[in-house]
Each structure stands twice: as structure tokens, then as C-alpha cells.
Amino acid sequence: MSHALPPKPLTARACGPLQGRVRPPGDKSISHRAFLLGLLSAGETRISGLLEGEDVLNTGRACAQLGARVERVGDGQWTVRGVGLGALLAPAETLDFGNAGTGSRLMMGVVGGHGITARFDGDASLRKRPMRRILDPLVLMGAEVLEQGEGGRCPILLKGTPDPAPIEYRTPVASAQIKSAVLLAGLNALGRTTVIETEASRDHTEKMLAYFGATLTSEPFGEHGRKIALEGRPELTPKPIAVPADPSSAAFLIAAALLVEGSDVVVEGVMTNPLRNGFVATLKEMGADIEVLETREEGGEQVADLRVRHSALTGVAVPADRAPAMIDEYIILAVVAAFAKGVTHMNGLQELRVKESDRLAATAAGLRANGVAVVIEGDDLIVEGGAGACPGGGLVETHLDHRLAMSFLVMGLAAQKPVSVDDETMIATSFPTFKPLLAQLGADCFS
């Protein structure tokens, strides 16, 4: 399956102060789930603020292949006329998820719990990502993996079961994707499906399932974990979903405002779910001037406007147990750390090795290319900051990873020399308005 566009290099150079108000695009995690819950509910789900990046749109297309009527009715406004639990159609063609790890893994849960067979595939980056950890619990529930790439990777032919067994499953790592796949398969089970996590991962699936009418409990388990129990075969009722702004996308705007001298920016409507706020919590420990202006609820999630001003930052130790709450923000945190005074020690980042790229190695390589001292010790990343100054001047290999590209472009806005990335095309998968929003704040310095 070919998705290869010619690479499009991009360079970011130092800019003047960033000023103004800006709203990041809708949250990627919730946008994927909005389409999936729309598919599994009988009737029309109206979605506003959807992230219209390629990853999410691929999930929408897959929902249409399984029988939903998916329609764009305005900017970020979509309707999904779902077929309901147990009534999915077998897709006539391959479900092509492009770069979307979340979309493909969650949809494996949906297919695994229904009596249909579907082929999953995507781009070169998605084909490298491990899927066994998703497939293992689905097989326990009765699904069959008929074909798979080497090491349990895409392309995968998955035969679901019309009568999934309700199981109790302990996730091997803190992963919202594993948990969500099991719960989505368990929706069509007769009985109670239970997922136990020793480290709590983001809980958007549980919140949205409850919002759509599923009976579900979530209680503490051990020191940092959760035990989630879902009653199968609920009557899911379509509900309107207002998608809050994506904290992972907001992270790039927040970082840019912190690093570019004289900046004063308000980032609007950012989701402040405690299981997603590790980045902002860490920045505050580093001395970041981030003020919470207004807190409210959107789409069942708490959101706030954040006022961010340029700050002198100091390195900190980031505990391993914070990783699930900021797993997508470590690259941009490493870039911020390059400007801080002293050493920032990020602990327990093994999950970064199985993302769009080996993010741990790629982040270290990008920092070194820009004159920043960095060490990888086991699964830890240790960055020595330049106390406000970062040399820059490097070319960063992005490995088809959108977050690597955006993180190092933000570095270029404040570094002493311009920073280039070898390809910007994949930024459209998660944050298509990345450059226009920065330009709106005054950072029109990309070439």
C-alpha cells in the first residue's frame, strides 16, 4: 500500500515575540473515538470541533466501510449515522489507516468483537508498529488473526467473533489503545469485560462510553492503576460531541510561547484531563509562567484557556509514572529542555521506542544535530540545557514522524541558527493548521 509523497523539507528561523489568542485543533484521541462511537450507536451522532487531520479522516473512512454514513457538514462539523452494535457490515476493501496507530488499533477492537472479517493496513510507518499487544486479548475473546506481517504487524487480516467472550485482562503496559480495544470488543459480549491497568492510561474511551449510555465502572487499583468493568450489549444512544482542543497539539504552541523572547499567548480550550496534563505540570515545575484563565466542560472533558508567557526555565527530573499522562509530549519537552538551565532527566520512556519512529533515538539524534548535549541511559533521556540559548543550525531526520517535525521546527523559532527538518508532509496527519496558527501569533518564519 503506497502513500509515499516526495519529502518536503522545511526550515524555521528565529522570530519576534508571539502575541495573541489561538485555539488548537480538536483532540486527536477524542476525534477518533467520536467516529467509532458514532458507528456503534444506532442513529445520528453530531460532532463539532473534529480534528480534520489525515489520521482521523482515515478512521472516518473506515467507519463508512463498516456501514456508517459519515458526512462533513461544515468546518470541523460532521454527522455519523451509525448502524449500532452487532450490525456492522464486512468491508469490501482493505481498511487503510495511513499513519493512524490509534485509529487502526481501536478499530481492531471493534472488528474483533463482531462477526466480520477485515484487512488492516497503512503506510510504511504504520507497518512498523507492533500490533500483537492489541491482537493477544482479542484472540482470548474469540477473534482469529488469519494473516499478519512479520512480528504481528500490518497488513493484518482479522476475523472477529459475533459472540466475544467477556474476559478479565491485565494490560502488560500502560496503554489506552490496548485498554480501549478490549473495551470496544467487550461492548458486544454477553457479560462483563474487565481491564486492569497497574498504571492508569488516558481515560477518554471510558468517559465517552459512559456518555453514550454504556454501564461502566472505573475504580483505583493498587497505587497508580485502575480497574475498569464494562457490562456488554448496552443500548448506545447517539449524543452530540464537542471535541475539546488537543493538549498534544497545544504543546507546540505553549512551547513556542515559552521559548520565544517577549511572547504572551493565550491558548484556548485546552483539555485539562488529569491523565493528559503531564506536559503542563512538568513545565510549571521548570518555572514556566502558565496561568489557567477559565475552566469549563466540553464534550464530557474539562478544558481551560492557558495564558503562556516567555519564561526562564530550569531542568527537572521527570518521574517515570508521569509517562502515560504525556507520552506524546516528550519530544517537544526535550526541545524545551534544550533551552533550560541545567539538566532535564526524563525517566522510563520505553514506550517511545514503539511510536511512529523510535522516538527516543530520533529525538536524541535531532538534539545532537543542533548542538545540544544529550544522553540515552537505558530508557531515560537526559538533556543538558543551554540556559536560554540553543545553537540550532542542524538538519533533523523526521522518520515520517509528525511530532518530531513539529518539535524541531519550534526549536528553530528560538534557536541561534535556523533549524531544518527533512520532511514536513506528515504534519498534516495530526495538526494541519500548525504553520497557519503560528503565523497568526507572529511566527511567519518558515521557508
Image: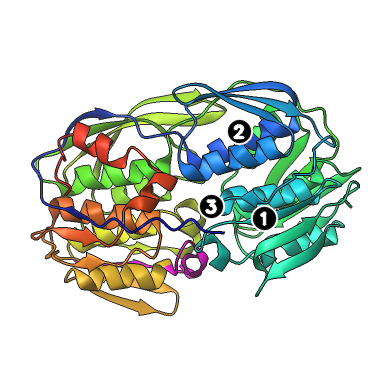
Q: Position of residue 363 (x, y in %)?
A: 33, 67
Please tell me whether mark 1 sits on a helix, a strand or a loop: strand
- Please state which amino acid type lies under the numbered disc 1: Phe
Which image quarter: residue 82? top right
Q: Tell me if 270 is positioned left or right of 133 in this view.
A: left
Q: Is residue 328 left or right of residue 116?
A: left
Q: Which residue is mark 1?
A: 120
Query: Would residue 258 appear left or right of 57 to someone viewing this image?
Result: left
Of circles 2 and 1, which is in front? 1
Q: Is residue 44 visible?
A: yes
Which residue is located at x 44 percent, y 37 percent?
A: 272
Q: Residue at x 69, y 67 (%)?
A: 132
Alpha-carbon distance for marks 3 and 1?
10 Å
Dividing the picture into quadrants, the one containing residue 299 is top right
Residue extending furthest toward the bottom: 377
Question: What are the residue bounds of the magenta stretch?
Answer: 342-358
The residue indicated by pointer 2 is 34
